[in-house]
Each structure stands twice: as C-alpha cells, then as structure tokens.
Image (tube, grey):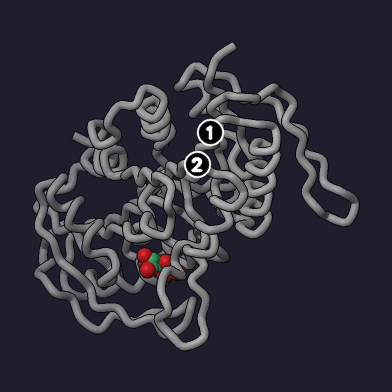
Amino acid sequence: MSQHILFSGTSHHSFASELASYLGMPLGQVLFQPFPDGEIYVQIQENVRGRDVFVIQTVARDPNYYLMELLILIDALKRASAKSISTVIPYFGYSRQDRKDKPRVPITAKLVADLLVTAGATRVLTMDLHAGQIQGFFDIPVDNLYARPVLADAVLKLGVKDLVVMAPDLGAIKIARAYASHLKGEFAVIDKRRLSSEEVSVTAIIGNVEGRDVLLVDDMCSTGGTLVSAAEACKKAGAHRIFAAFTHGLLVGDAVTKLAESPIEKIIMSNTVPLPEMLQHPKVEVVSVARLFGEGVRCVISADSISSIFN
Ligand code: R5P
C-alpha cells in the first residue's frame, strides 16, 4: 500500500483526474451523499490510517458549498487518522478580502485559513494567491505556485510583437512585472478606480502603448469589468493588438460576452476554475496547470524544492 493517497472534492473533476493521471496515482474513493435538507455527508472509502493524504478542491463557482465540502472532507480524513493532510486548492476562494480596507468588514482570507487548519489541514498547495502575504495567515506550510510558465507560453504562440505587459490595476503590478520579465516586454500600469463590485473606471495609463501589442495580466477575472475597461483605455491610447491572460477565470454573469465584445483579441486563462461548456468561446483559450500542481505534489512527496519547478 502506498504511503500517499489522493482524494478529490466535487468542485472540479476534470482537474483532479488530470492531476491524478499526471502523478500516476488513482483518486481514492469517497462517498458523497447529501442529507435531504442539503447538509453535506461524506465517507472516505479507503483506509488512510497513518498515510499522507492530498485533497484536491477548488473553491469557486459555488464557493460556499465547495469550501464546506472541503472542510468536511478534511475532518473525515483527520478522524480516520491520516498522518498528514495536504490540501490542493487551485483557486483559493475568499482570498480577495485579505485586509480591513473599510470599517466593519471581515478578513475572509484569514477566516478560511483558520477554518482549514482547525479542520485538520497540515499543508496548502495553491496558485497565484490574490496576495502573497496570505501565506502568513497560516502557521502551516503554504506553497503558492505560479501559472505564469504555461500562460506565458500560450501568449508567445500568439506571435506578439513589441509587447507591453499591462497591470490593469495597482494590485496586479507584481504579477504583470513578472510576466514582463518572463516575456521580455515592457511594463505599464493602469490606475483603476472600483466604483462597485461590478463597475470600474480607468483614470490613467502609466506607460506608452501606442502602436504596440498589449498583454493585460491579472490574477483573476470575475465580472470582466477590470479587463474590459483596461482594454478600452489601451485601444483609445492607440494600442495595436490587445490580449489578456489571467490565472483564475471566475467569469461570473455575462463576463465572457463582455470580454468577447471588448477590444481583446484573445483571452488566455488557466483551468484552476472549471469553465462550463456554455461559457466556452473561440476567443477564450484554457491552458492546463494540472502538470504544475502535479510537480508541486511530487516535490512535497519527495521533499524537493518547489521553486525548482519555476527556474
Ligand atoms: C482585484 O483585485 C483582482 O485582482 C481582479 O482585478 C478583480 O477581482 C477582477 O474583477 P472584475 O473582473 O470583476 O473586474
């Protein structure tokens, strides 16, 4: 019997299967059978006593349900005497509320960190956390992977020329700088004001985009408001071709339609969040980061350096 075993929640089957097949490990059996009133019930159908367990669950599309399901899975594994419980969370939901930026608001990223640890998680493997500092909300190891190598490769295939990598808001400066250096492009930034959770306005572009290809880069796209207003501002400022790349495609409501009707020519996103068939569009290309997570899990198992994956 192997010391390591993988389990998955129900949020993203295709990702979990891809990760399991990359690692050449089967997914452990779990019975999911909700109670008639909607409460979640799970039963782990494998012996995990003394074993090192990995649980895969992305917290998106129905974040409240999938977060609760993840906590319940971890609890079941802890009570079944798993030796360690590493949670593989491709998209760490609730991460945007990571500081008290207004009076009387929660810090949900810290709350979720506490919930995971209380449930029994001993490690978190995730990707492009909204803010790297969220790692400090945990007193267990957190490995924050980057989608950049695979997204940047897909961007290169678009034949971009004279590239400016644009941060569509100040929060995206760090990720956009990393892409600019990876793609050997210039770096620019947009000064964005958020008017509501669905509305943003661009006040200024800091940098020159005239006649140049622009790549808008962000950690996530939710309503599409940020990227659409950034793309329109770049077009107005004389950009040649405009592309967008982001890790987490939350793509709520009519986000895909808004992006498709915007000046953005092609959108490259990872598969940390499932893209339902009805949201697929020829302008949207999804690239898989399951291999990167597979390498992350492999490094945890063999105690190798995770940063070596990115060098
Ligand atoms: C904000 O801090 C994030 O990095 C994204 O820019 C934001 O969540 C995107 O949201 P939306 O697509 O709704 O503008």
From the image, tell me which residue sits under label 2: 122
**Residue toward you, 199 or 149:** 149
From the image, tell me which residue sits under label 1: 84
Say which element carries label 2: loop
184 sits left or right of 51 in the view: left
Q: Is residue 277 visible?
A: no
Say which element carries label 1: strand
Q: Residue furthest bottom?
A: 103
265 sits left or right of 289 in the view: left
How far from the left and from the top, in percent, is residue 59? 56, 52
State the residue at coordinates (49%, 16%).
24
**Residue toward you, 268 or 150:** 150
For the residues bearing labels 1 and 2, Cβ distance under 8 angstroms? yes
Q: Earlier in the sequence, mark 1 or mark 2?
A: 1
- Give, as a three-letter code, the residue at label 1: Ser
252 sits left or right of 136 in the view: right
- Give, as a three-letter code, the residue at label 2: Thr
State the residue at coordinates (27%, 60%).
216
State the residue at coordinates (40%, 81%).
101
Quarter of the figure that contains the N terminus: top right
